[in-house]
Amino acid sequence: MLCKLILETNVLIVTLDAAKVGGADQLQSYASIAGIQFRAISTGSELANIVQKETEFDFIFVDTAGVPMYNVNAINNLSNTLDVIDISQKYLLVQASLSKSALQDTISAFKKIQPTAVIVSKIDETTKYGELVEVLAETGLPIAYIANGQAIPDDIEPADKAKIMNLIIPDFCGSGGENAG
Ligand SMILES: Nc1nc2c(ncn2[C@@H]2O[C@H](COP(=O)(O)OP(=O)(O)OP(=O)(O)O)[C@@H](O)[C@H]2O)c(=O)[nH]1
Ligand SMILES: [Mg+2]
């Protein structure tokens, strides 16, 4: 939405989640509200076709179906599907409420996809962020965005060091922190 409404670039959103009932619906609604072009597809060849033919777009955002971290076949299939195109940024979405070991397992399981950064959602559903930041620091994966609620796009914001510091040690940062517990 930022790319389309503020930067005024030509944006296409593609979802690979067309096979799941309702998988594409919510994203399609948001795209429609923002006047963003939208395609729902199921295969890597359809994806390759779109990227090759739809050359008028400045940005193509590709949403994938959610994949369970212990389903190795599904992760391999997703990797093969995405390998058909060159992707400049690949975001792995992780929930802030995951335990340390679940987060480690998730990042390890999705290494095959070679994410360039993570998006941390559900910041509002926990009050402890130290382990999250510790695990991400160990992996070297940057945090690109954080989501702090269900309102789109208001609750999604770019991550920066000050915001992350404020989550971990809100008192030290002086705000008391909305999510401090
Ligand atoms: N409270 C809260 N809810 C969130 C946040 N981010 C997403 N959700 C909710 O979590 C649910 C799952 O949202 P997504 O992460 O977009 O996942 P999805 O696309 O529905 O699922 P998959 O495609 O299967 O991964 C939805 O009901 C969202 O409204 C957040 O930061 N805070
Ligand atoms: Mg989805």
Image: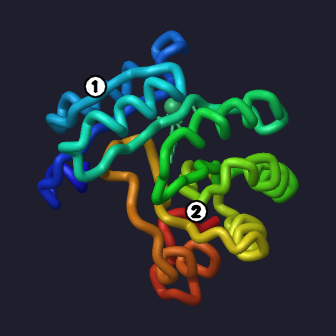
- Whether residue 174 appears in this view of the structure is yes
Q: Nearer the viewer, mark 2 or mark 1?
A: 2
State the colouring used for the structure image.
rainbow
Query: Would residue 97 be found to the left or right of residue 118 on screen?
Result: right
SS state under label 2: loop
Where does residue 133 sit, x and y in percent of width and height?
69, 71
Q: Quadrant of residue 170?
A: bottom right
Residue at horizontal 57%, vertical 81%?
165
The alpha-carbon separation of the residues under discs 2 and 1 comes to: 27 Å
Q: Quadrant of the C terminus?
A: bottom right
Percent position of residue 15, x then y: 43, 29
Q: Residue at the location (45% across, 47% down)?
A: 149
Secondary structure of the residue carrying numbered label 1: helix
Q: Which mark is residue 29?
A: 1
Q: Which mark is residue 13?
A: none
Image position of 180 (left or right of 137) = left
**What is the crowding at mark 2: few (fewer than 14 residues within 10 Å), some, or many (at least 20)?**
some
Type of amino acid under label 2: Thr
- Mark 2 in CB contact with mark 1 (< 8 angstroms): no
Where is residue 1? Give x, y as percent: 25, 48
Q: Is residue 57 above or below residue 142?
A: above
Name the residue at 76% across, 73% down.
Answer: 134
The amino acid marked with disc number 1 is: Ser
Residue 123 seen in this snapshot? no
- The percent coordinates of residue 106 (x first, y second) are 77, 49
Q: Where 46 falls versus 105 (above or below)?
A: above
Residue 103 vs 179, above or below: the answer is above
Closer to the N terminus: mark 2 or mark 1? Answer: 1
Q: Is residue 62 left or right of residue 133?
A: left
Q: Which residue is mark 2?
A: 116
Camera-side residue of 154 and 11: 11
Residue plotted at (70% across, 64% down): 128
